[in-house]
Image: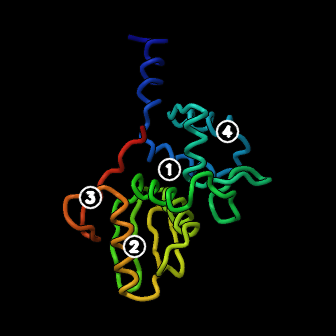
Amino acid sequence: MTGAGDALIFTYVNSHAAPVQRRHEIAVLVRERAVRSQDELQRLLAERGIVVTQPTLSRDLRDLAVVKAASGYALPGGSAAPPSEGAAARLARLLREFALVIAPAGTLVVVKTPPGAANAVAQAADQAALPDVVGTIAGDDTIFFAARSAAGAARLARSLQNVRPRSNGADSASTAARRPRPRA
């Protein structure tokens, strides 16, 4: 089949891009350039082969904690608007969706996420004001939670692990990363 049929197949296949990959592309675009509107972001994603509806794009921006600044959309780092759901519920939802590995390491807890998701999870953790946590540092796919003590880090790791589905065996740095569950 050639012509319009090929475009239809291409659009259908790519409209179901994995949420993790789509959100990664959103984070990359927002970092690379000044994106001033959802329409512009939707067009830029389409140029990369990712067709997304406006409601899905809005959810992705919220879940990534992207904020609208005078210069356009920005990733967390400034002051974001408070989330519409409770801070603890938002953190639990983001951990279930994005946490691949949760492992204590001395007075730290290391959380691995897919690329582009760590900032949103860390911001949700900061807003949840977790006991035993004195601060968080997030990169693109890794979060360090600094605890007051090694015992506090162990408690925090157990607490974070309990909000998401069990993987095959205990989480550790050597455990193979599990895939996040797709959104409904």
Alpha carbon separation for disc pair 1 and 3? 25 Å
User: Which numbered dot is residue 110?
Assistant: 2
Disc number lying in front (1 or 3): 3
Disc 2/disc 4 C-alpha distance (Å): 33 Å
Q: Secondary structure at mark 4?
A: helix
Q: Amino acid at mark 1?
A: His
Horizontal and vertical percent position of residue 125: 52, 67
Q: Which mark is residue 166?
A: 3
Q: Are marks 1 and 2 in contact (CB under 8 Å)?
A: no
Q: Nearer the viewer, residue 65 or 115?
A: 65
Q: Earlier in the sequence, mark 1 or mark 2?
A: 1
Residue 99 is left or right of residue 117, and the answer is left
Point out which mark residue 24 bears: 1
| Front: mark 1 or 2 | 2
Q: Nearer the viewer, mark 1 or mark 4?
A: 4
Kindly identify which numbered label has been placed on residue 72. Answer: none
Which one is earlier in the sequence, the residue at label 1 or at label 3?
1
Label 1 – label 2 distance at C-alpha: 20 Å
Q: Residue at x 77, y 53 (%)?
A: 71
State whether residue 21 is above or below residue 31: above
Amino acid type shown at disc 2: Val
Sequence order check, earlier mark of 1 and 4: 1
Question: How many residues crowd mark 3 within 10 Å: few (<14), some (14–19), many (20+)?
Answer: few
Q: Position of residue 126 (x, y in %)?
A: 56, 69
User: Is 151 in front, or is 80?
Assistant: 151
| Res 81 quadrant in image | bottom right
How far is the residue under mark 3 from the one under mark 2?
17 Å
Q: Secondary structure at mark 1?
A: helix
